Amino acid sequence: MNLSPSAPPSRILHITQPVEGGVARVVTDLMRAQLADGLHVTVACPGGGLAPALKALGADVRHWHATRSPGRTLAREVRHLRRVLADVRPDLVHAHSAKAGLAARLAVRGRIPTVFQPHAWSFEAVNGATASLALKWERWGARWADRVVCVSEAERVTGERAGVRARWRVIANGVDPGRFRPAALSAARSGMPLLAGLGADTPLVVCVGRLCRQKGQDILLAAWRAVIRQVPGARLVLVGDGPDASALRELAPEGVLFAGAAPDAAPWYQAADLVVLPSRWEGMALAPLEAMACGRPVVITDVDGARESLPAGQEPVPAEDPEALARTMTRLLLDPRLRESLGQLGRRHVLAHHDVRHTAGAVTDVYLELLHGSTRRPHSAFVEHTPCGETTEYRESIHS
């Protein structure tokens, strides 16, 4: 279905950097839904695994040579994007994450309807003068975004409190509950060479995420020393790769395995007794949602965005607190009934609130408003916030 029944398919240009991890998975899920919806979708991104995956879906992919962080090459990257814009002639631009948001908004400068999705704020990821520069840019660059889409209310509040004045839209991340689904523990482990010899009765904790400071694997390793004293024989698997891989290997105590990057994390969730993400900051991580969709209990830290992904009544643990993290993991590893109960609760929560189809529909409604001044489909309630602090609530409705 086109955004406008009487017009040709709308041309949407997604611009993204990074090309791995949660941002890449969000972009891939949006591509899949929007292509099925009849949109003409193009994505500009650097090389890596994302481009071939999107081409396989039928997306038009344009190579954009861009580093992950701003630097001396920024001006060249902006010029390249302008050439892409001239060639694609999109009706709307959707920029994902800080680097793409910077370059895209400099290239477009408000001449085309623009959606910016930070996927966690740039000024939270750095310190000192760099953080100050990032904050100044986000305040300035907001004028060139017709909508700023946040994946959690906490992410929006963080931006607003930091002085970013924008037309906000909060759309929670979603996952595919058909792809991420429960499976028998023994069957899941039997097909994984790294887990050869581990029976279904061996306690297994899995952490899926880029190996970097944001995701807090160093905190998890510090907590793990206390866990294995209480749960002898337990194993911890870190799934992912990143700049901190070597340092984390040096820190790793007994019972820790490194799986490297995985093209499909679902088997790891299905093989786990418990999934942990000890982040220092988040927009709204996909890993806990994917794990809950697989019927596995999760432990996450009390940081913006992360806490909003939990079912009502389930509490996160304090951030950067290895002792609290160890206590929670130990309690769950020693209580199979509680793990089973939390896993079932998490699966129901994802089906009700984080189905990727609802997320894609809400994003499409943002496009409709910007391109045609209307909405198309029913979706869960969300709130739009204006720069002046006014709010407009949109509730589920049926469109003829």
Image: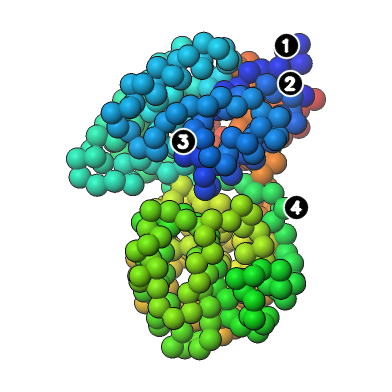
Structural distance between the alpha carbons of marks 4 and 1: 33 Å
Q: Earlier in the sequence, mark 1 or mark 3?
A: 1
Q: Which residue is mark 1?
A: 7
At a point 51% along the width and 52% down the height, the residue shown is 285
Residue 141: image tag:
none
Three-letter amino acid code at the position of disc 2: Asn
Using residue 305 as the reference point, say whether residue 275 is left or right of it. right
Q: Residues within 10 Å of mark 2 (few under 14, many from 20)?
A: some
Depth check: 95 or 262 in front?
262
At a point 48% along the width and 62% down the height, the residue shown is 277
Residue 2: image tag:
2
Considering the numbered disc 4 on the image, is that residue within a helix, a strand or a loop? loop
Q: Residue 142's quadrant in the figure?
A: top left
User: Mark 2 and 1 residues: CB-CB less than 8 Å, in contact?
Assistant: yes
Considering the numbered disc 1 on the image, is that residue within a helix, a strand or a loop? loop
Q: Earlier in the sequence, mark 2 or mark 4?
A: 2
